Amino acid sequence: MPKGCPADRTAIFSAITSKYGKIEQITRQQLVDLCQEHDDLIFPQWLTNDPTRRLSRGVYSLDDMPGVPLAKPVATPNPVATAEFITTADNTSFLPQAFPGYVPFGNYNHLKKIIESKKFYTVFVTGLSGNGKTLMVEQICANVGRECVRANITVEIDEDSLIGSLSLVNGSTVWQDGPVLIAMTRGAVLLLDEVDLGSNKMLCLQPVLEGRPVFVKKLGKVIYPKAGFNVVATANTKGQGSDDGRFIGTNVLNEAFLERFSVTMEQEYPSAKVEQKILNNVLAEAGHQEPQFVEYLVTWADIVRKSFAEGVSNDIISTRRLVHICNAFAIFGDRELAINLCLDRFIKRTKNGFMDLYNKIDPSVGTQSNDETAVVIEMPQAMAA
């Protein structure tokens, strides 16, 4: 008997009615079970191969089964037509926590004016590692009461990671907004952290960086940015890669992508006075008062940074590294131990050179190493005298 002939169809419909009643749709698994129970039934490929019957993956219409009312013609279904649409961050606050010891410096006031204005004006913040770029954005948002949605950029990040994606949760298809849609729909600041680690997959953000609506293909919906939405990116480079190899993994970003940022702000390390205040606040928070130690640390870091600028040293002591040292001192109560622990991330030659320099500044700490290969960083003559 040819497959799909009237007798074949009648037998299938009769078996379906007998087992399941007068149903409007059936699954592939139900058909498989039915054919296994009836040796005389042939699996109805004429049904499962008919695109007009396919309602969704493995689900088929029985419009013309006797006793079942005809439905309207079904178009090729949207894969998310039966999905549950949720935003996992609906009940989450993205207002950053204020840091009690934070000291504003650098571009703080300029960026604060932009974020406070709630105007769409994209900003690219660039500067060496550990000088407070990301913390500055978060603390401004905390200060002016603006939500900040942070997306940590890597070379693996793509449109699904940024915009949103479909996920299978407890057997159901669920749409989950990515950080971009969360920020857009909440009128929040989108922080693209370490943006120069991204690839050309970030070009999906072109309309976002123009403040335009985004068409989400998987939803078949246009998402409009809420008033107050803005984008701030941070990076160690200006999107042209790292010439000296210090920031390995950073990429040359597409010029069209970079051009969509309204302004670029270069963030330097804080001045000695500001840096001392930062470190004093860190120690005070831990119940310590060590102004002389803080002065030594800031002087030491300043000499290292100048040596780095002159090409004498290939590494630098960042503000973040000084904060790590203060926190280590608050735990152990030992200057030399705190510095040694926080310098262990450097190769031995560099660590010994940095430690030798600190020993010349702080008379209460250790002795000079015997490592002849250590980086030699000279103190200014005025200080040596």
Image (cartoon, rainbow, N blue to C red):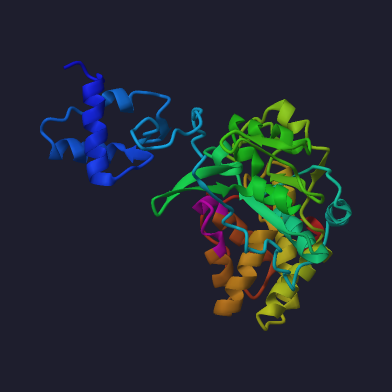
Q: Is residue 62 left or right of residue 36?
A: right
Residue 384 is drawn in which quadrant? Answer: bottom right
Closer to the camera, 165 or 231? Answer: 165
Q: Is residue 154 magenta?
A: no
x and y, in percent, of residue 14 in the image = 23, 35
Compared with 153, 136 (above or below) is below
Can residue 126 be seen in this snapshot? no
Q: Residue at x 29, y 22 (%)?
A: 46
Compared with 35, 354 (above or below) is below
Closer to the camera, 239 or 84? Answer: 84
x and y, in percent, of residue 332 in the image = 55, 78
x and y, in percent, of residue 168 in the image = 43, 48
Q: Residue at x 72, y 31 (%)?
A: 257
Residue 291 is drawn in which quadrant? Answer: bottom right
Q: What segment carries the magenta color?
A: 342-350
Q: Is residue 343 magenta?
A: yes
Which quadrant: the C terminus? bottom right
Closer to the camera, 39 or 264? Answer: 39
Q: Residue at x 49, y 32 (%)?
A: 77
Can residue 298 be seen in this snapshot? yes
Compared with 49, 56 (above or below) is below
